[in-house]
Image (spheres, rainbow, N blue to C red):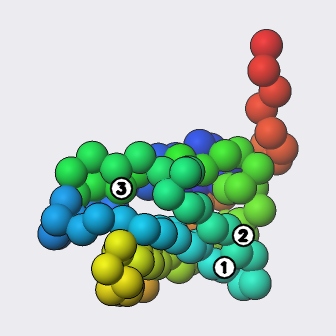
């Protein structure tokens, strides 16, 4: 992912469509910077969870370092699931700051 952009993260979870979700957390962490997306922040289509980050969120990350991501889900029957932790490289930009509207 590149700093200052608005990437949509897509995570495919085999068997997700069979789980009745009670609670969901998508957590991103890099050097003490933690971002958390909940079920209200994501869209779920069958077995794919999509979450979009803001410019501000990606600008809070440091370039040339990986960001760690993990998905945790609690089902309505109180079964807790956690994905493997994956890492994604963070790429630099030349012009800092948020690109304003208009």
Q: Are marks 3 and 1 in contact (CB under 8 Å)?
A: no
Q: Which residue is identified by label 2?
A: 62
Which comes sooner in the sequence, label 2 or label 1?
Answer: 1
Name the mark nearer the viewer: 3 or 2.
3
- Quadrant of res 102: top right
Work out how far the residue at label 2 is from the one at label 1, CA to CA, in angstroms.
8 Å
Residue 13 in view:
no
Query: Is 40 or 102 nearer to us in this picture?
Result: 40
91 to 50, vertically: above or below = below
76 to 53, vertically: above or below = below
| 18 lies left or right of 62 | left
> Residue drawn at (35%, 73%), measured in percent from left and top?
76
Percent position of residue 61, x then y: 71, 66
Residue 68 in view:
yes
User: Label 2's element?
Assistant: loop
User: Which residue ends up furthest to the top in the rendered image?
Assistant: 102
Which comes sooner in the sequence, label 3 or label 2?
Answer: 3
Name the mark nearer the viewer: 3 or 1.
3
Percent position of residue 96, x then y: 82, 47
User: Label 1's element?
Assistant: strand
Q: Which residue is identified by label 1?
A: 30
Label number found at residue 49: 3
| 30 lies left or right of 44 | right
> Residue drawn at (24%, 68%), measured in percent from left and top?
19
Q: Are marks 3 and 2 in contact (CB under 8 Å)?
A: no
Percent position of residue 25, x then y: 52, 70
């Amino acid at each position: 992912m590149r700093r200052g952009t608005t990437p949509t993260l897509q995570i495919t979870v085999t068997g997700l469509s069979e789980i009745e979700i009670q609670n969901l957390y998508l957590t991103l962490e890099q050097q003490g910077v933690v971002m958390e997306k909940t079920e209200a922040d994501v869209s779920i289509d069958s077995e794919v969870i999509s979450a979009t980050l803001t410019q501000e969120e990606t600008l809070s990350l440091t370039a040339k370092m990986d960001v760690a991501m993990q998905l945790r889900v609690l089902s309505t029957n109180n079964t807790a699931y956690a994905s493997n932790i994956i890492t994604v490289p963070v790429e630099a930009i030349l012009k800092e700051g948020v690109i304003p509207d208009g």
